[in-house]
Image (tube, grey):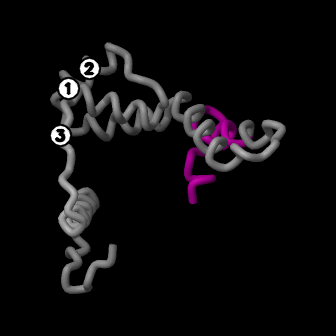
Amino acid sequence: MSVPAADLLPEDRPINVAVDHYLRAGWVEAGVKPAPLLSRAGLIRRMTLDLAGRIPTRGETRGFVESSSPLRWTQLADRLLASPDFAYHHRNELDLLLLAAKKNDGEFRKYLLAAGPGETGRGTSCFAR
């Protein structure tokens, strides 16, 4: 999507506002109607599946749904990104994307686990830059 300079948002807008603005503009331009909003339970399920590769536990879902914290999304994302579940899921996804059709000895999988989040990991930025 190309945005004329006159239609750019001011740089001081929060990133989530800018992303929403440009996504909405793309939808309008393409004639796409967005899906209805999900419930909190549906949203934690989707986020946990995307980041951890699993469904959330009942306790995780209940805690998130009942939370009134304005930081609940940030806290959930931070917790999932720092979890071993994320490291394993991310490793598996990258392995499938990059090596699915190639014979390999598992060294890349070992590297991804060591490079990812966790006690000895360096975080995802080391291989996501």
Which of the two marks, 3 or 2, is nearer to us in this view? 3
Which residue lies under the disc numbered 1?
67
Q: Is residue 118 left or right of residue 47?
A: right
Q: In terms of secondary structure, where does tag 3 sit?
A: loop
- At 33% from the left and 73% from the top, the residue drawn is 1
Whether residues under marks 1 and 2 lie with C-beta atoms below 8 angstroms apart, the answer is: yes
Q: Quadrant of residue 128?
A: bottom right
Q: Report the disc number at residue 37.
A: 3
Q: CA distance from mark 1 to mark 2?
A: 6 Å
Q: Amino acid at mark 2?
A: Gly
The location of residue 85, given as percent across then percent down, is 53, 28
- At 46% from the left and 25% from the top, the residue drawn is 54
Instruction: Look at the image and give the residue range highlighted in magenta.
Output: 111-129
Q: Earlier in the sequence, mark 3 or mark 2?
A: 3
Whether residues under marks 3 and 2 lie with C-beta atoms below 8 angstroms apart, the answer is: no
Q: In terms of secondary structure, where does tag 2 sit?
A: helix
Which residue lies under the disc numbered 2?
63
Q: Is residue 122 magenta?
A: yes
